[in-house]
Amino acid sequence: MALQEGDFIRLRYTGSFGENIFDTTDEERAKEEGIYNPRADYGPVTIRLGSHHVIVGLEDELMGKEVGAEGEVDVLPEKAFGAHENEEVRSVPVTQFREKARKGMRVEIEGREGLVVDIIGRRAVVDFNHPLAGKTLHYSYTIVEKVEDPIEQIKGLIKLYAGRSDIGITIAEGTAELALPAAITYDRRWMVWRGTLVREIFEYNPEVTNVVMKETFPRPATPAAAAEAPEAEETAEETTEE
């Protein structure tokens, strides 16, 4: 059956421009191309068609395809990361940087991230366009399967937004419960995206009326307990010798 808006799928893909690969779900390919991220969770990603979980040009290509389909598509800038806007290239005093400015460094100014493309005297020229703005992109893809299970759909969204696969999920009597690992509040990516995740859980699962997040902290071993263990071993050894 042809895929349509609202369907969840697992997708493998590799994105490139010219000879440069900038993104892939294939771990070995990432290593070969020198873009491997040891903190990334490689493998097929779960997306919902129509929700712009991938760029518009790739999403348009996937609509109407069948599970198992493989293909390639060129995506023009207007359906990728937009045109390169000259007004997004600005001159900034180097005094705004925390470290010495140099060409090629990425900086954050007033909450926006940019790339230093030139340095003229005491000012740096910073490009605030997306790094892939103005580029025609090429994608190869495989539609692995359709995802019907709501729990697997939510797991896919968590991985997509927060890059995590260590959150347990149950759904019972209209409540979706997320079992959070300890100290997840220190994960900046999770904190930024959890609101979006909750909104999409409600939007895509009409039967869910509550989302509950439970963070569990296991009791740490006390120093006394740790000290007792060697003493117990010594006592056992003494008894054996006698």
Image (spheres, rainbow, N blue to C red):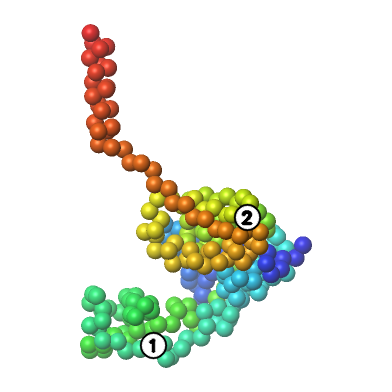
Q: At which x and y percent is residue 141? A: 61, 65
Please name the residue that numbered disc 2 is placed on. 174
Q: Is residue 175 above or below residue 238?
A: below
Is residue 74 shown left or right of residue 223?
Answer: right
Kind of residue sitting beneath label 2: Gly
* Residue at 49 percent of width and 50 percent of height: 179
Residue 12 shows up from this direction: no
Mark 2 secondary-structure assignment: loop
Mark 1 secondary-structure assignment: strand
Check the image and name the residue furthest to the top.
242
**Residue 187 numbered tag:** none
Please name the residue that numbered disc 1 is placed on. 89
Q: Is residue 104 above or below residue 192?
A: below
The residue closer to the viewer here, 223 or 149, is: 223
Asked if the residues shown at circle 2 and circle 1 are in contact, with their CB atoms under 8 angstroms apart, the answer is no
Residue 195 shows up from this direction: yes
Mark 2 residue crowding within 10 angstroms, few (<14) / some (14–19) / many (20+): few
Lower sequence index among marks 2 and 1: 1
* Residue at 26 percent of width and 86 percent of height: 93
Mark 2 vs mark 1, CA separation in Å: 49 Å
Kind of residue sitting beneath label 1: Val
The residue closer to the viewer here, 121 or 107, is: 107
